[in-house]
């Protein structure tokens, strides 16, 4: 199958695209590209777009199991803003995001900075160590943490008492003041793997000639980092910020497996509360309304991060 | 050539996605096992295929046990193929909810009236099983317990469950530890009962002995095993969980508040521990490994489960009461049929249920596998002559103490969450009356 471009004489710029191929060729390539995209598009439409639209639609209904939906307009949204537990869950979610996102990003950058210049074997070893919690199943991770936090024979109490930090056992997951911090700690350990791998890669790709030139010109290590390296890894940082924010907002499995939102709603998050409303109380409309609000918050924050971090990347 | 290849590849990828999609729609039977006589079923041109979902009730969570039952069933009914899927209590309800919304429910489900009757039955999702409740069956089951018959019947008078077995949930103590610390004097070993005052004394004795990490744990990290904490609270001062006609929750009554205040006081004095980080399964583990001196979540099945782990005698007990009249929470398990609109499947499902529950040979075997007791009085002692005979005889003595089966009260699902949340508040030092009032308000609102 010979392309028509090789047979047909060039008839002028109107018949050719800017890339120097004919319109027919461009159209065929476009069709081929879309066909390649089609499988993902089907999944994206079926499992993302349509559910999103359905979520928005259902949020305007009093929807429950085995009964026709009743249109309630903004009733679910009004109910949500009057729901104390929703606000508690929102605050907990915000706390998780505010603490986890900067610490995960900063710690990942610090670790990556320390290991990216190591020999390949050493670097791979550390990447593997930090990535292990990511590839380990969530259930296995939480079972181990639950044992470590155990009030009666957990290793954390054992060590803390041993070094004199505490006098009596602390019920880490059973105390409203400590439970949320335990969740954040576990989330932190399971979130740093991917950012570290990304940062190691990004730092390795920084143009060495620029850093060497800066050092020759008398720049300090800090100046070299901020003026030369940081701008080059900003796109990676932006990506890490966005995915960590989204992951933190969507913290669910840890809560479900460890605390069920307790004690006294101290670890309720929006995601868990959505699950609770939809799967335990069958309040699908109300759960979807919360989902819409969560999506809006994540979208706004992501846009803000793109705006702020994107500026330095222009 | 390149483009042709690209098109073929794109088409193949698209088709593979469609194929994957097709697979995902049949997740209800993924991971399931189909047990049948195979050749006989396959040779029949009119085989009916039904699906059974079972919660982990005794050995009904074991594939070899259930497959054995189905093989026996297929000897008589080779044209009915039964697929089985095993649920757990952590995610089972979510799976059923998803299946209901996806209109992909199993034909048969094995659980108790609080799900089959009060929840799915009340929502019109289940088949009326009144035809299974023949005069003979009703009389036979009534002879064991009228409460079982009533529990299987919805508010509309239709039967949504056909029961197989029952038990009365109780508690257990570490016998050797009680003896060693001198706490054994506070229990009546003959009747396995104790008074509220003696219960408190036993807790204090155990605490003061320093031989156990905590005398008892009021687990409140989730709803699993909540029958234990409900029975504890209700029995201490003879409170009730609901009113007699099951139309309102009464956990904020003076008796219940007094009981909760006592437990809060004991918690403050470290004679027991309210633990929001633990669920019943965790508490059982704490009991089994000697961290706690007693468990509030005991029954014959749990004893069998933990038999190999414990290094002491788990001594089954009634819950402590102030008036000597124990009211244990009952457990009833049986089968329900989801109304999938296929008469052939419904009939096949009923045939299967009748065989499993009523067959003179299979019925007792089905009960034995649960580790509980038959609802049919005609089955007699199904453990006679087995290695479990003595052990089960002990648990049988608890059956007469089974109290009102209030699990059929409306809003059951919602109140379960409200209950452990309330216990968390009580354990956290909140005002008991206010916490109980909030529980009752939330739960009654859910009755609808």
Image (cartoon, coloured by chain):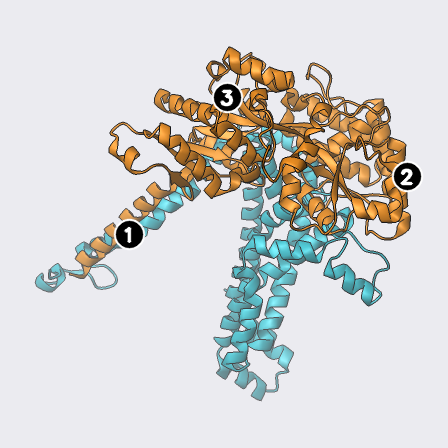
Along the horizontal axis of the image, is B338 left or right of B172?
left
Chain ID of residue with mark 3? A
Residue B208 coordinates in the image, percent (x, y): 91, 49
Q: Which mark is residue B201?
A: 2
| Chain A, hue in figure | cyan
The image quadrant of residue A279 is top right
Residue A86 appears in the figure: yes
Residue drawn at point x = 82 percent, y = 48 percent:
B177
Task: Specify few, some or many for label 1: CA neighbours under 10 Å numbering under 14, 14-19, or 20 or more.
Answer: some
Callout 2: helix, strand or loop?
helix
> How far apart are labels 3 and 2 at the CA level?
52 Å
Residue A313 coordinates in the image, percent (x, y): 51, 65
A103 to A121, vertically: above or below: above
Q: Which mark is residue B279?
A: none
Residue B190 coordinates in the image, percent (x, y): 81, 32
Q: Which mark is residue B13?
A: 1
Residue drawn at point x = 70 percent, y = 58 percent:
A148
Residue drawn at point x = 23 percent, y = 59 percent:
A17
Chain ID of residue with mark 2? B
B84 to A39, vertically: above or below: above
Task: Specify few, some or many for label 2: CA neighbours under 10 Å numbering under 14, 14-19, or 20 or more.
Answer: some
A52 to B168, vertically: above or below: below
For the residues bearing labels 2 and 1, Cβ distance under 8 angstroms: no
Marks 3/1 same chain: no
| Chain B, hue in figure | orange
Which of the image's four quarters has the C terminus of chain B?
Answer: top right
> How far apart are labels 3 and 1 at the CA level?
39 Å
Tell which tag, 3 or 2, sits nearer the viewer. Answer: 2
Q: Which mark is residue A67?
A: 3
In depth, the one of A33 and B197 nearer the eye is B197
Q: Tell which circle, 2 or 1, labels the residue nearer the N-terminal end.
A: 1
Which of the image's four quarters has the N terminus of chain B?
Answer: bottom left
């Amino acid at each position: 199958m010979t392309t028509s471009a090789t047979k047909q004489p060039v008839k002028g710029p109107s018949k050719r695209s800017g890339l120097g191929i004919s319109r027919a060729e461009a159209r065929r390539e476009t069709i081929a590209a879309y066909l390649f995209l089609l499988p993902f598009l089907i999944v994206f439409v079926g499992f993302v777009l349509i559910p999103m639209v359905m979520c928005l639609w259902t949020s305007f209904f009093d929807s429950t199991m085995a009964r026709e939906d009743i249109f309630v307009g903004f009733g679910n949204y009004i109910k949500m803003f009057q729901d104390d537990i929703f606000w508690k869950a929102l605050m907990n979610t915000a706390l998780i995001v505010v603490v986890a996102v900067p610490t995960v990003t900063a710690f990942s950058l610090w670790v990556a900075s320390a290991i990216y210049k190591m020999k390949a074997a050493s670097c791979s070893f550390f990447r593997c160590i930090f990535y292990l919690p990511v590839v380990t199943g969530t259930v296995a991770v939480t079972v181990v943490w639950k044992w470590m936090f155990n009030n009666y024979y957990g290793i954390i109490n054992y060590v803390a008492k041993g070094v004199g930090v505490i006098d009596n056992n602390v019920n880490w997951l059973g105390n409203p003041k400590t439970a949320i911090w335990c969740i954040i700690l576990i989330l932190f350990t399971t979130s740093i793997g991917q950012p570290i791998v990304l940062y190691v890669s990004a730092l390795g790709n920084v143009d060495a000639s620029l850093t060497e030139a800066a050092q020759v010109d008398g720049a300090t290590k800090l100046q070299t980092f901020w003026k030369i390296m940081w701008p080059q890894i900003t796109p990676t940082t932006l990506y890490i910020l966005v995915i960590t924010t989204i992951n933190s907002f969507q913290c669910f499995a840890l809560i479900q497996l460890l605390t069920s939102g307790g004690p006294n709603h101290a670890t309720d998050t929006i995601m868990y509360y959505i699950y609770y409303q939809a799967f335990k109380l069958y309040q699908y409309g109300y759960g979807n309304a919360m989902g819409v609000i969560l999506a809006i918050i994540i979208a706004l924050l992501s846009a803000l991060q793109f705006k702020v971090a994107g500026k330095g990347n222009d | 050539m390149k483009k042709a290849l690209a098109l073929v590849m794109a088409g193949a990828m698209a088709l593979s996605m469609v194929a994957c999609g097709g697979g995902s729609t049949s997740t209800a039977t993924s991971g399931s096992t189909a047990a049948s006589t195979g050749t006989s079923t396959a040779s029949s041109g009119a085989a009916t295929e039904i699906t059974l979902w079972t919660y982990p009730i005794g050995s009904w969570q074991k594939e070899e046990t259930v497959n054995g039952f189905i093989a026996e069933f297929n000897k008589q009914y080779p044209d009915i193929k039964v697929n089985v899927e095993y649920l757990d209590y952590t995610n089972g309800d979510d799976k059923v909810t998803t299946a209901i919304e996806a209109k992909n429910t199993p034909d048969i489900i094995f659980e108790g009236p609080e799900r089959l009757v009060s929840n799915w039955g009340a929502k019109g999702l289940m088949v009326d099983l009144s035809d299974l409740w023949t005069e003979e069956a009703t009389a036979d089951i009534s002879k064991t317990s009228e409460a079982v018959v009533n529990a299987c019947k919805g508010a509309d008078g239709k039967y949504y469950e056909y029961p197989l077995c029952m038990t009365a949930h109780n508690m257990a103590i570490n016998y050797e530890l009680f003896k060693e610390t001198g706490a054994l004097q506070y229990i009546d070993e003959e009747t396995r009962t104790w008074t509220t005052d003696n219960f408190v004394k036993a807790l204090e004795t155990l605490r003061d002995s320093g031989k156990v990490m905590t005398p008892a744990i009021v687990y409140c990290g989730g709803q699993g095993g909540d029958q234990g904490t409900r029975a504890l609270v209700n029995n201490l001062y003879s409170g009730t969980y609901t009113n007699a006609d099951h139309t309102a929750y009464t956990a904020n009554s003076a008796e219940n508040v007094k009981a909760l205040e006592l437990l809060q006081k004991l918690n403050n004095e470290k004679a027991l521990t309210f633990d929001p980080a633990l669920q019943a399964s965790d508490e059982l583990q704490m009991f089994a490994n000697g961290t706690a001196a007693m468990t509030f979540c005991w029954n014959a099945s749990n004893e069998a489960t933990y038999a190999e782990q414990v290094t002491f005698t788990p001594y089954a007990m009634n819950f402590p009461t102030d008036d000597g009249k124990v009211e244990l929470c009952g457990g009833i398990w049986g089968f329900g049929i989801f109304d999938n609109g296929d008469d052939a499947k419904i009939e096949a499902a009923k045939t299967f249920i009748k065989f499993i529950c009523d067959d003179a040979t299979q019925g007792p075997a089905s009960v034995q596998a649960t580790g509980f007791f038959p609802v049919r009085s005609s089955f007699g002692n199904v453990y006679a002559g087995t290695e479990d005979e003595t052990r089960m005889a002990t648990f049988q003595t608890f059956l007469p103490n089974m109290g009102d089966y209030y699990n059929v009260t409306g809003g059951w699902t919602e109140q379960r969450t409200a209950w452990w949340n309330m216990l968390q508040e009580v354990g956290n030092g909140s005002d008991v009356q206010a916490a109980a009032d909030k529980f009752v308000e939330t739960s009654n609102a859910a009755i609808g």
